[in-house]
Image: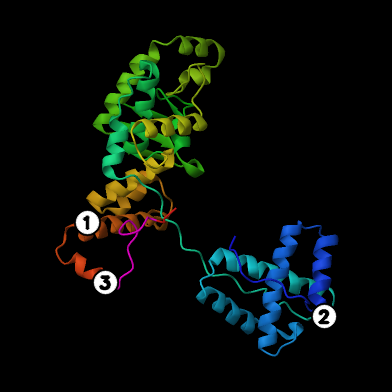
């Protein structure tokens, strides 16, 4: 929530005071929320007074102009949305009280927030994570976790798709790996199936894991206790199918051991898969198919990551790049910290 230096005046208009009493007593909003309402409504009263208008005569055009002023003053889209929500509730209450005929804020919406870029690892960091050999881990866990990393990064799988894989095809399997065809059959969002190629390194890791998996007491117990768990490609020490939470935990630990600065999570590897593939191929449609996106607009966000990669390469290598520094704000990742979430 945006902080504001505004403070409610000593005396608010009577209608605002009555409304604040309403939200405090009848709606029982938290004290901090009531205080923020008072600040936002004081700003509304100030705008109306400056325009020479009673609050009851404010029109939609006025609200749009005041919103534009907030936006121009640097208030975030989320902060503006919260202010408008407060004003909208106030005018809705005035309507219920019979003091106005329409709500001037009803059809006013805050500017859209910029869509944050997905977090992706640099190529070197992704390779370092995939190549990690954890000498402290037992061979069973190390083989499993390396295979999971290779599938997440090498195939761009969602974590739900990963943990839903079975060791072999069956009528009830949600997904499986066909080692001979070097393909992963996965069940994605909306029950959509797709086929994703599996690379050489992922295949090697999978074969190593499957050999260890078959020689496992937990698997024998699972066959007796939970056939579904026994069918799972990735199982835990207790013989049950590995959960998404477990994958998150193991991946974060491997990221730390690999010396990566940013906390690693499964979707970051999916983002890295898409970004790195676009950097080398520029084939947006192919990446859309591999990720299983229904709309290409969802995939297009990765083109922004690809542009960042190209822009950084230009800044680092072109002899005329330094001439652009004067009077140009630093690009994300150049001269300032990358603020993309």
Please report the residue visible at 47 percent of the width from the left and 26 percent of the height from the top. 171
Image quarter (top left, top right, bottom left or bottom right) of the N terminus: bottom right
Q: Position of residue 198 (x, y in %)?
A: 30, 33
How far is disc 1 from disc 3 in space, using C-alphas?
18 Å
Q: Residue furthest front?
A: 10
Q: Which of pointers 1 and 3 indicates the residue nearer the eye?
A: 3
- Work out whether mark 2 precedes mark 1 in sequence or the reverse, and give the earlier one: 2
Which residue is disc 3 drawn over?
326
The residue at the point 64 percent across, 74 percent down is 107
Q: In this figure, which residue is indicated by the disc labeled 2? A: 99
Residue 197: x percent and y percent? 30, 36
Q: Are marks 2 and 1 in contact (CB under 8 Å)?
A: no
Indicate the position of residue 25 as horizontal and vertical percent values.
Answer: 85, 61
Query: In this view, which residue lies farthest toward the bottom?
Result: 52
Q: CA distance from mark 2 to mark 1?
A: 61 Å
Whether residue 111 appears in magenta in the rendering, the answer is: no
Q: How many marks?
A: 3
Q: Which residues are magenta?
A: 327-338
Residue 155 at x, y percent in the picture: 34, 38
**Secondary structure state at the residue bearing disc 1:** helix
Q: Earlier in the sequence, mark 1 or mark 3?
A: 1
Q: Secondary structure at mark 3?
A: loop
Q: Nearer the viewer, residue 289 or 18?
A: 18
Secondary structure under the numbered disc 2 in the rendered image: loop
Q: Which residue is rendered at x = 84% and y = 72% of the image?
A: 18
Membership of 332 in magenta stretch: yes
Seen from the viewer's position, the closer of residues 241 and 17 is: 17
């Amino acid at each position: 929530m945006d902080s504001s230096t505004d403070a409610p005046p000593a005396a608010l208009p009577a209608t605002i005071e009555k409304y604040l009493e309403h939200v405090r007593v009848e709606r029982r909003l938290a004290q901090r929320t009531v205080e923020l309402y008072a600040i936002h409504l004081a700003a509304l009263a100030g705008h109306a007074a400056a325009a020479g208008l009673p609050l009851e005569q404010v029109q939609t055009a006025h609200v749009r102009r005041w919103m534009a002023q907030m936006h121009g003053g640097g208030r975030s889209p989320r902060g503006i949305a919260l202010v408008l929500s407060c004003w909208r509730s106030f005018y809705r209450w005035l309507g219920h009280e019979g003091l106005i005929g329409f709500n001037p804020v009803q059809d006013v919406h805050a500017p859209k927030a910029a869509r944050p870029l997905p977090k992706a690892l640099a190529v070197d960091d992704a390779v370092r994570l995939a190549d990690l050999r954890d000498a402290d881990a037992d061979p069973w866990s190390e083989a499993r976790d390396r295979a999971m990393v290779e599938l997440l990064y090498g195939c761009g799988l969602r974590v739900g798709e990963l943990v839903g894989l079975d060791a072999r095809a069956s009528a009830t399997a949600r997904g499986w790996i066909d080692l001979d065809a070097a393909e992963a059959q996965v069940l994605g969002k909306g029950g959509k199936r797709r086929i994703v190629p599996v690379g050489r390194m992922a295949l090697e890791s999978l074969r190593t894991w499957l050999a260890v998996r078959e020689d496992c007491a937990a698997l024998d117990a699972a066959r007796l206790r939970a056939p579904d768990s026994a069918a799972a490609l990735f199982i835990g020490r207790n013989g049950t199918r590995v959960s998404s939470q477990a994958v998150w935990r193991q991946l974060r630990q491997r990221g730390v051991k690999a010396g990566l600065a940013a906390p690693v999570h499964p979707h970051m590897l999916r983002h890295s898969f898409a970004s790195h593939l676009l950097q080398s191929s520029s084939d947006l449609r192919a990446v859309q198919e591999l990720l299983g996106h229904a709309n290409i607009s969802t995939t297009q966000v990765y083109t922004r990551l690809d542009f960042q990669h190209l822009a950084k390469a230009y800044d680092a290598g072109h002899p005329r790049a330094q001439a652009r520094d004067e009077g140009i704000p630093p690009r994300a990742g150049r001269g300032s910290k990358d603020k993309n979430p």
